Image (cartoon, rainbow, N blue to C red):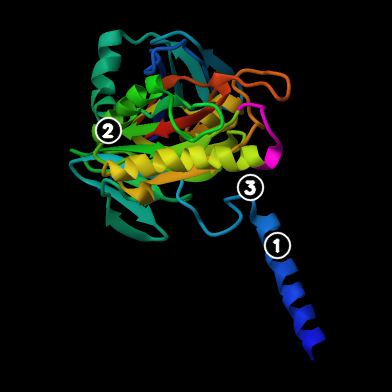
Amino acid sequence: MLLLTGCPRQALFVVLPNAEGGGVGAITVEDGKTVTTLDQPYATAESRAGSTAPSEETQGNISVIFRSAIAARPILPHHFRLYFILGSDKLTPESQAAYRAVFDDVKQRPVYEIEVIGFTDTLGDLPSNEALSLARAAAIRDALVRDGLDRQAISIAGRGKRDLLVPTADQTPELRNRRVEITVR
Amino acid sequence: MAGGKKLRLRLALWLAVAVLIATAGVPWAAEPSPIAQIKKVTGQAVVLRSGERRPAKVGEMLFVRDVIETGSDGGIGITFIDNTVFSAGPSSQIAIDEFLFDSNDFRGAMLAKMRQGTLAVVSGDIARSSPGAMKITTPTAQLGVRGTTFAVQVYGDR
C-alpha cells in the first residue's frame, strides 16, 4: 500500500489556527542541531537531511496539502458542566435544560465515548461527599442510558470535595462546586 | 482448623487489597487498555497490530504500538483518551509508539512516529498539562508540542 522508497525524506511542519477557537500554542522542531519554534498561525518550517529552517508557504498551499487530513478530522471532544441541587443528585432546573445539549452533542457522533465525573461542595464530611459525587455521576449516566445511549460507552467517577471548581472554606455550600463534568468524544 | 481457614481468608483479602493498591492509578501497568478510538474512516485504511493487518473500522479501539496506514484514497480520524485528535490524509503511516495518560491529573506522555503522508493534530490534555511530553518524530526531525492545532507532512524528494 505504501511506497516507501529509499530516497531522502523531508518534512513540512505548520501551526494551524486553533481548531477549538482559543489562543494559538506552539510547536518546536528539533533536528539534533537546531530547535525551530513556530508559534503563529500558518508559520511553517521544513526539514531535510538534518537541517531545519522556517519556510514560507502560502495559506493556499497549506490548505491544499492538508485538505484530506483536515477533512478526516472527527468531531472534536466537547466538555460540559451540569449543576445540582444542594445535597442531592438532582439537577437544577437550568441544568436540566443544559442536559439536552449534552444528549444532542452525543447524537451527532457516529461513535462516542462519554466520561462523567461528579463533584460536591465542601458541606458535610469526606465519605458522604465521595458517595454523593459518585451518585451524581451515576444519575447522569442512568439518564443518558434511559434516553437510549450505550451504557458501555459511558464511564463514571466521583471526586467528592477534593477538586473544587470555586475554592471555598470547608463546610461552605457553593452551587458551582456541586457539579458533574462531562466529556463527550 | 477454623483458625487456619480464617488466617488464609485474611491473607487472601490482604493480597487482593495489595493488588488493588498496586494497580490503582497506573492503568498502563496492568492489562493493555485502549488509548484511542477510530472515529472516522474514508477510503482504504488499515491498522497494523502485532504483525497483523486489518481494515480500520469506525468504533474500533486502538492500543499502544498500533500503526495506522491509509491508501492513496484513504483517510482516518482517531481521538485519544486524553482528547488529542489525529487525522491523516492519503498514503500516510503513523505508529503510536508510546502513550501514557493518568486521567486523575491529566498528565502523561505520547510519542508518535510518522514515516509518510499528512497528519493534522488537535492536541489534548497531555500537551496541555505536561508541556514537551507529546512528541511526533519524522525521518528528519522531532516535533515537540506545547498545545495547539498543527499539521505535519512527510514526503520524498520531488
Q: Which residue is mark 2?
A: B89
Residue kind at label 1, given as amino acid type: Val
**Lateral position of residue A43 relative to residue B42, left or right:** right
Q: Which residue is mark 3?
A: B25
Residue at image x 31%, y 57%? B53
User: Closer to us: mark 1 or mark 3?
Assistant: 1
Whether residue B77 is visible, yes or no, is: yes
Q: Chain of mark 2?
A: B
Residue A51, percent from left and from top: 52, 22
Distance between the Cα atoms at labels 1 and 3? 14 Å
Whether residue B84 is visible, yes or no, is: no
Residue kind at label 3, given as amino acid type: Gly
Residue kind at label 2, given as amino acid type: Gly
User: Closer to us: mark 2 or mark 3?
Assistant: 3
Disc on the earlier residue, 1 or 3: 1
The lab-note entry on whether marks 1 and 2 share a chain reads: yes
**Chain part drawn in magenta:** A121-127
Disc on the earlier residue, 1 or 2: 1
Q: Which residue is mark 1?
A: B17
Residue A184, percent from left and from top: 38, 33
Asked whether disc 2 touches disc 3, contact meaning CB atoms under 8 Å apart, the reply is no
The quarter holding residue B146 reads top right
**Lateral position of residue A43 relative to residue B91, left or right:** right
User: Mark 3 packing: few (<14 Cα in 10 Å), some, or many (20+)?
Assistant: some
Residue at image x 46%, y 37%? A116
Q: Nearer the viewer, residue A64 or B103?
A: B103
The lab-note entry on whether marks 1 and 3 share a chain reads: yes
